[in-house]
């Protein structure tokens, strides 16, 4: 089930919110967990079993870290930060993290590993060693996100950054909460722990939530879908002119931004309607003046997660310059691989990791700092767009062919003129241009909704109604981050 569907908008959401506010407060986490499992199991009920198993196992490991094997029914303070940990606690955190990563590896990377193994033995002439397995593992929706939530909970408890959740229902609510379940943002336990104990319900918070959701829906339906259709036309074409290739690359850059930031806005809005305050996930990333700044603005919840749970444990920048560059590159490679089991994602991560290292090496003498601000923004956007080509293309040969088309090296075919007839329709040109205006000229959702007025509220509700009307006419409505 996706947010931008009539089933969610007209059936699931009204029923879920109605039941949530009718229920006594002590039962709201239970109710929210149940409706979240319905939401998650809508596409495939078997996915629910895996998520519930991960939830139970990480909950038990958390209890062992906090209490040992006895006294689970009594409250306990958070572990002392920097204090000594017993061997049992070390084993519990290690086992929990290892099992979470193992589940992620099996379901997300098993097919990828087998394909690469078979390709390798075939390349060295050892076909007899190929593993011709019939098993193809389906990737469960949102497994990357709820696995990271489990890891965040265990590590935060172990470090002393959060207090264990003794109530299993409360913990289940944290893991399964439907607004952020299948596509983020990644809510770290420390960011929501106190809200699980108690939170305020106000008209202002609910109103801001509706506004967030309305703007997110408009981003998705009006901008992301239109840009996505144009991008798909280009990336699926056998041959492109230089202008068409650049048009398609920019269209995809807008699509993925408005698709994911729109989803994040809707998730944050739904959280506010339920009384939760989720952190900002996007901060006008295409206004960045360097790739370093880009990762302080793009998918903030993933950036902070990789920084706190991978980059810093690897040593961060505390073990010399050479080690810092290795750590940066390693983190971005793994960040790319986290997005999907394909070499294109690894290359995407390598581009960003290489640029982060290059910018750090250049320091204040970098060309970013010498150039005027609009030039810095434009160069950063171009680098991000080139990386997006590898992110979007179905495989490496397709990505390289598209990159060649950007500079006039692509194949030419008579059919390429048909592509132009599809691309340059007023509908697509209008919405791609509107996407550019929103990216560089309008305030971001977080700032726009900080102080609501009646005029803003009416405008956003009108935008929501218009988006739903357009949704009823669309057959193209993908959510990019659902596959991650």
Image (spheres, rainbow, N blue to C red):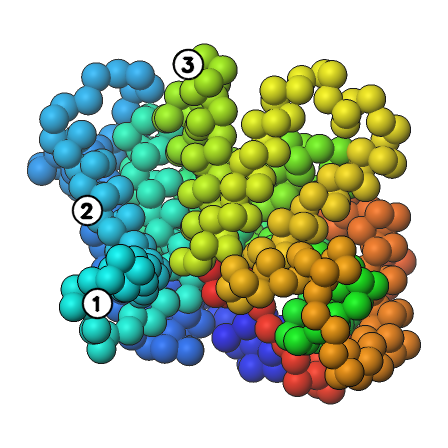
Residue in view at x 71 percent, y 80 percent: 471
Residues at circles 3 and 1 in contact by the CB criterion of under 8 Å: no
Give the alpha-carbon distance from disc 3 to disc 2, as whole Å: 35 Å
Give the alpha-carbon distance from disc 3 to disc 1, as whole Å: 44 Å
Front in this rendered view, residue 178 or 346: 346
Q: Which mark is residue 60?
A: 2
Residue 352 to residue 52: above or below? above
Residue 219 to residue 188: above or below? below
Can residue 464 be seen here? The reply is no
Q: Which residue is mark 3?
A: 319
Horizontal and vertical percent position of residue 476: 66, 80
Horizontal and vertical percent position of residue 215: 74, 61
Residue in view at x 64 percent, y 26 percent: 359
Q: Which residue is mark 1?
A: 127
Furthest residue in direction left, as rendered: 69
**Residue 123, quarter of picture:** bottom left
Q: Nearer the viewer, mark 3 or mark 1?
A: 1
Kind of element beneath mark 1: helix
Furthest residue in direction front, as rendered: 125
Residue 121 to residue 362: above or below? below
Residue in view at x 50 percent, y 55 percent: 344
């Amino acid at each position: 089930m996706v947010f931008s569907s009539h089933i969610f908008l007209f059936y699931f959401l009204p029923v879920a919110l109605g039941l949530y506010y009718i229920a006594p407060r002590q039962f709201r986490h239970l109710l929210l967990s149940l409706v979240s499992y319905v939401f998650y199991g809508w596409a495939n009920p078997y996915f629910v079993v895996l998520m519930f198993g991960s939830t139970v196992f990480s909950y038990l490991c958390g209890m062992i870290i906090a209490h040992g094997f006895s006294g689970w029914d009594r409250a306990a303070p958070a572990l002392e930060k920097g204090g000594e940990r017993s061997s049992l606690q070390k084993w519990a955190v290690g086992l929990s993290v290892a099992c979470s990563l193992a589940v992620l590896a099996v379901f997300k990377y098993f097919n990828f590993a087998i394909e690469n193994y078979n390709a390798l033995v075939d390349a060295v002439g050892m076909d007899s060693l190929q593993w011709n397995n019939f098993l193809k593992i389906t990737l469960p929706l949102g497994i990357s996100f709820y696995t990271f939530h489990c890891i965040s909970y265990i590590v935060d408890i172990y470090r002393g950054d959060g207090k264990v959740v003794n109530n299993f229902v409360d913990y289940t609510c944290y893991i399964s909460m439907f607004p952020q379940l299948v596509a983020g943002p990644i809510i770290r336990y420390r960011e929501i722990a106190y809200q699980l104990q108690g939170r305020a319900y106000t008209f202002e918070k609910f109103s801001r939530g509706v506004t967030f959701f309305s703007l997110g829906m408009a981003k998705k339906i009006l901008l992301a879908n239109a840009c996505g259709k144009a991008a798909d036309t280009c990336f699926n074409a056998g041959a492109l002119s230089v202008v068409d290739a650049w048009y398609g690359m920019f269209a995809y850059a807008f699509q993925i931004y408005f698709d994911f930031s729109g989803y994040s806005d809707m998730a944050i809005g739904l959280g506010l309607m339920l009384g939760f305050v989720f952190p900002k996930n996007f901060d006008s990333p295409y206004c960045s003046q360097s790739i370093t700044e880009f990762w302080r603005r793009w998918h903030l919840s993933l950036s902070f997660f990789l920084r706190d749970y991978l980059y810093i444990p690897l040593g961060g920048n505390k073990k010399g310059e050479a080690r810092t560059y290795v750590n940066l590159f390693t983190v971005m490679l793994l960040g790319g691989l986290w997005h999907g089991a394909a070499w294109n994602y690894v290359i995407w991560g390598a581009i960003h990791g290489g640029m982060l290292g290059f910018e750090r090496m250049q320091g204040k003498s970098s060309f970013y700092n010498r150039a005027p601000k609009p030039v810095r923004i434009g160069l950063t956007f171009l680098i991000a767009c080139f990386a997006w080509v590898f992110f979007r293309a179905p495989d490496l040969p397709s990505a390289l062919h598209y990159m060649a088309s950007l500079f006039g090296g692509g194949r030419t075919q008579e059919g390429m003129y048909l592509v132009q007839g599809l691309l340059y329709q007023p509908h697509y040109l209008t919405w791609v241009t509107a996407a550019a205006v929103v990216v560089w000229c309008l305030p971001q959702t977080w700032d726009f909704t900080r102080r609501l007025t009646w005029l803003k509220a009416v405008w956003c509700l009108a935008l929501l109604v218009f988006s739903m009307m357009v949704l009823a006419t669309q057959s193209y409505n993908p959510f990019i981050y659902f596959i991650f």
